[in-house]
Image: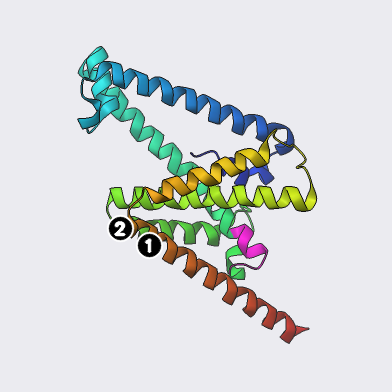
Amino acid sequence: MGFEPAAVIAGEAREPRRDLPVGMLGGVLGAGALYILLLFTCFQAVPDVGRSTRPLADAATALVGPVGATVVLLTAVVSCAGSLSGFMMASPRVLYALAIQGDLPEVLAAVHPVRRTPWVAILTSALLVWLITVSGTFVYLATFSAIARVLTYASTSGALIVLRRRVGPAPIPIPLGPFLAIVALLSALVVLGSTTGTAVRDVSIAVVLGWAGRTVTRRWNRMVVATTA
């Protein structure tokens, strides 16, 4: 979906409590409306859109000619560059936050003395992305990424239900939040059931390795604290 990086960097915003809900909901609604219009246009302009390898470019060609296809392809390049830039801003801060709370090695929490950025987490994130990129095909990586996102959304939905019961409504509650969380969990199960077994297996391995690394790191931190106390 792409809206979750806004929540990752919200701590660096001036008024996150005021701006974040409006920005995220507005972005999701705007992107959803744009996707619906694009799908409608493709269905109308491309005779056999199911067999098209580049439906947006084909729709642009049908509407305004070859120039339209070129514009769409250039827009796709700019969009991918913007998405990667946003990812490189948000992803290292996830590693930084996990290191701060003791779930990852402390070195990932290092902050540059001048630029005040988590430079070790940035370099580590870039290296990990490069390794994953060269390890498989585009289709496989897209599937892997989609499953990882679905699991993230499902765990967030589950956390919402648990936290509502433990601590009550959120500071900015969304109407029917628990109901929507249950719908999201069911949707995640449907998506996972329709994906390939190989991708689910590899994502499961990554989750297990991540959990094992977190457990080892937390135990190591406890040992260090007990030794220095």
Cα distance in 3D space between marks 1 and 2: 19 Å
Whole-percent x, y for residue 26 in the image: 59, 27
Is residue 137 in view from this perspective?
yes
SS class, disc 1: helix
User: Is residue 102 one of those drawn in magenta?
Assistant: yes
User: Is residue 132 one of those drawn in magenta?
Assistant: no
Question: What residue did someone put label 1 on?
Answer: 201
Which residue is farthest top? 64
Q: 118 or 49: nearer the eye?
A: 49
Q: Is residue 8 left or right of residue 34?
A: right
Vertical comparison of 1 with 65: above or below? below
Q: Residue type at mark 2?
A: Val
Q: Is residue 225 left or right of residue 220?
A: right
Q: 189 or 145: nearer the eye?
A: 189
Q: Residue type at mark 1?
A: Arg
Task: Kindly report which numbered mark, 1 or 2, lies closer to the viewer in this rendering.
Answer: 1
Q: Which residues are magenta?
A: 96-104
Which residue is farthest bottom? 227
Question: What residue did someone put label 2 on?
Answer: 134
Q: Is residue 37 left or right of residue 12?
A: left
Of label 1 and label 2, which has the lower sequence position? 2
Do the residues under discs 1 and 2 have CB atoms within 8 angstroms?
Answer: no
Whole-percent x, y for residue 209 in the image: 47, 69
